[in-house]
Amino acid sequence: MSIWKDQAPAKKDAPLPPEAPAAPLRDAPAAADFSPAVTAPPGTRPVERTAPQEALKESLIAADLTIEGKIEGTGHIRIAGRFKGDVNVQGDLTIETGAKLNGGVRAKKVTIAGELEGNIESASRVELLSSGVLVGDVKAGALTVAAGSRMRGNAEFGWDDTPAKGGKSNGTEPGAAA
């Protein structure tokens, strides 16, 4: 019995109809590119897109976590919870509002919106936001302090580690009394 009106019932000994050739199997689905297309003017070579070296992965310590240990690596770190230990990364460190870090920090850029109890060494840039609290010393290439933030400690910024021409290596300026 057939559910379509124009189809006759198949005979038991009738040969099967030839099947269409099967589509070739793919190993993996194609990845879609949703970035806008860039066309080059006629007669010029199109510019190849490469991922910037600054596009490092970011790791997150969530707001409901408390971790004790040591963080080392090349990516960016975002702390929204509590961390006790040293952080030594070649990327950026962000301490979110309500987060707390107890330990020493070495990072390219440090942004503090929460609380840091520890020293920051050799950062190229440190930003203390209005909700930020820093209890410790800072050594950085540049320091930005927002109104309303709090800090207790010493700050050294804008200095190179190499002595200036004619200057002393103990950190005093040329011509200053020792």
Image: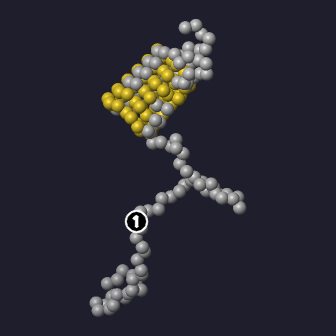
* Quarter of the C terminus within the rendering: top right
Percent of width and height locating residue 47: 62, 54
In this view of the protein, which residue sits in the foreground, 171 or 88?
171
Neighbour tally class for label 1: few under 14, some 14-19, many 20 plus, Cα within 10 Å: few
Vertical placement of residue 43 versus 121, above or below: below
Q: In this view, does 107 lie above or below 43?
A: above
* Viewer-closest of 51 and 148: 51
- From this view, report whether residue 45 is shown above or below residue 83: below
Q: Is residue 102 visible?
A: yes
Give the SS element for disc 1: loop
State the residue at coordinates (52%, 16%): 170
Hey, what amino acid is under mark 1?
Asp
Q: Residue at x 58, y 7 (%)?
A: 177
Q: In this view, does 108 lie to the left or right of 9?
A: right
Q: Which residue is drawn at 43% across and 34% down?
A: 89
| Displayed quadrant of residue 102 | top left
Looking at the picture, tell me which residue is in the foreground, 44 or 100: 44
Q: Where is residue 57 in the image (x, y as percent from the top left)?
A: 45, 42
Q: Mark 1 points at which residue?
A: 27
